[in-house]
Image (cartoon, rainbow, N blue to C red):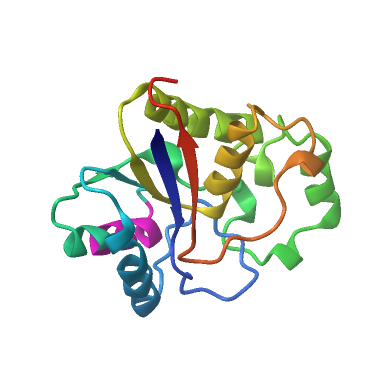
Amino acid sequence: MKKLWLLRHAPVMAEPGLCYGATDLEAHTDATLAAAQRIAPLLPAGIALRSSPLRRCTALADAIAALRPDLAVQHDARIAEMDFGAWEGRPWSAIAREDFDAWTGNFSEALAGTRGESVRAFMQRAADARDEWLAGEGDALWVTHAGVLRAVTLLQRGIRCPATAAEWPAGELAFGGWLTFEQPSGE
């Protein structure tokens, strides 16, 4: 049995309620170190350590590697957060309801923020990374984002792309929190 660990970055240095998917924000240093200290002793030897290339994730991955010198960080753009286009850097509350409804009304295909990424494209890159892990031999830790955690949750349920926004997993995983998924080796 192999395990995929999905670790969410620490809180970012930004106002609450900000849309910042692809925006490269830094995370709070103390919270980043605390998250690394919580997870590092739990990780098995030889686990593959992958990180989104965004600073809020690379800082956490680097902190884990500093605590666990046996682990080497590899950056993987496929596990970066979704690009919300023109909505990036704006408060969610400032996004026009009709624009948001237009996106969720064609959830799999519409470009978020009119020029961002579609859910289908986002899911496909997350699926590519997950499929690579499934074809591999061992455990992996991805230092990533809430959107990727939700995407992998759907993939584990056999959903390659949600048809509607209602299918998108609800709830929030805490900053610095993690999920794990087990898979029989070779499947």
Q: Main secondary structure of the magenta part?
A: helix
Name the spot of residue 156 as percent of width and height, x first: 58, 33
Name the spot of residue 70 as percent of width and height, x first: 14, 51
Residue 165 vs 174, above or below: the answer is above
Locate residue 171: give its quadrant.
bottom right
Q: Is residue 145 visible?
A: yes
In the picture, measured across the screen, residue 8 lies left or right of residue 91, that is left
Q: Residue furthest left?
A: 69
Residue 129 vs 21, above or below: the answer is above
Q: Is residue 83 visible?
A: no
Q: Residue furthest bottom?
A: 30
Answer whether residue 178 is magenta in the image.
Answer: no
User: Residue placed at 65% from the left, 32% from the top?
Assistant: 157
Residue 96 vs 116, above or below: the answer is below
**Magenta stretch?**
54-63
User: Residue placed at 44% from the left, 61% from the top?
Assistant: 9
Name the spot of residue 160 as percent of width and height, x first: 63, 26
Answer whether residue 61 is magenta in the image.
Answer: yes
In the picture, measured across the screen, residue 167 lies left or right of residue 20, that is right
User: Residue placed at 27% from the left, 43% from the top?
Assistant: 47
Looking at the picture, tell me which residue is in the foreground, 24 or 29.
Answer: 29
Name the spot of residue 49 as percent of width and height, x first: 29, 46
Q: How many marks?
A: 0
* Placement of the C terminus among the 4 image quadrants: top left
Looking at the picture, tell me which residue is in the foreground, 56 or 88.
Answer: 56
Locate residue 1: give its quadrant.
top left
In the picture, measured across the screen, residue 24 lies left or right of residue 113, that is left
Locate residue 134: give its quadrant.
top left
